[in-house]
Image (cartoon, rainbow, N blue to C red):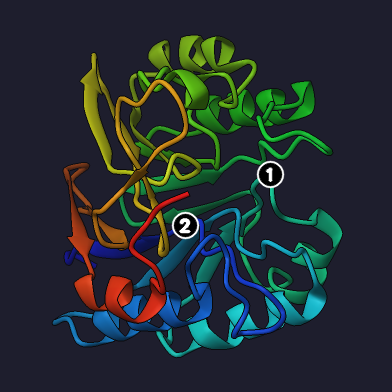
Amino acid sequence: MTEAFRIVHITDTHLWADPDTVYRGWRTNRSLLAVVEHIRAQGPQPDAVLLTGDLAHDEKPRTYRRLRDIIATLEAPVWALPGNHDHPAAFQQHLAPACYLSHVDIPGWRVILLNSHLPGRIGGRLQESELARLTQLLEDCQTPCLVALHHPAWQVHSAWLDVIGLENGPQLMELLMKSEQVRAVVCGHIHQQWDRRLGHLQLLATPSTCRQFLPGSTEFAEDAQPPGYRWLILRPNGAFETRIERVPQARSCGLIKEAFS
């Protein structure tokens, strides 16, 4: 295979069992449907769909099943991991039985999924067993790697978000900085675009499919940017490209009030 492998990254869908539920001024079911329709209308379709948590806000089995059915319309393998708003047991039973929950090898690359869910907490943490698994996967791999998790392991310069990130983020970053085959780390949680370079690492975060958080804010604040998603294009020679797609129609059909709260 010489063609690039195209991953579409979708995160922070915040769905509810009742598709008409309004979440902080958003009908999240409608905004996700608009995002998926936008992806389907693009040129080459994804070779895989990466979901990085906060998928079912109410953590109910019916919500995960509906998400599964919506994402299935993209007709691509799904790789999923939970966020702080997810229920791990329901997530695994109703969404992820057929998903890669550890890692997957594709031509020229290894994609590693990490579980940062911490029961009862908004912030996240990688358990020692998860860090040990990551260490082993990196040691056993000679190809470039993409690492995915829900919580950012770095400071995003928003005071209120930085206190609910990854508790042992510095430990993860130290490990990744020592592993030059790791080319990029991608996360959700912060409901905004983030794209920074740190040595050999590209640090990436992807907008939510519903409401957006204002970058650089000291306290909670929403942004008027539309929902979005990210393309990750991995080439067999180790090169990669990435871009954000914004979906104005997802804002139009999902947002029911202009005043943020």
At x 47% / y 15%, what residue is drawn? 173
Q: Report which quarter residue 171 is drawn in.
A: top right
Q: Nearer the viewer, residue 123 or 25?
A: 25
Q: Nearer the viewer, residue 84 or 77?
A: 84
At x 26% / y 61%, what residue is drawn? 226
Q: Disc number at residue 11?
A: 2
Q: Which residue is mark 1?
A: 84
The crowd level at tag 2 (other Cα within 10 Å; few <14, some 14-19, many 20+) is many
111 displayed left or right of 15: left
Where residue 115 sits in the image (x, y, percent)?
A: 67, 41
192 displayed left or right of 49: left
Residue 94 vertical position relative to residue 92 in the rendered view, above or below = below
Q: Is residue 46 visible?
A: no
Where residue 217 sits in the image (x, y, percent)?
A: 35, 26
* Secondary structure state at the residue bearing disc 2: loop
Where residue 199 sits in the image (x, y, percent)?
A: 23, 14
The amino acid sitting under disc 1 is Asn
* Secondary structure state at the residue bearing disc 1: loop
The crowd level at tag 1 (other Cα within 10 Å; few <14, some 14-19, many 20+) is many
Of label 1 and label 2, which has the lower sequence position?
A: 2
At x 17% / y 81%, what residue is drawn? 42
At x 40% / y 84%, what residue is drawn? 74
Q: Is residue 33 visible?
A: yes
Q: Disc number at residue 60?
A: none
The amino acid sitting under disc 2 is Thr
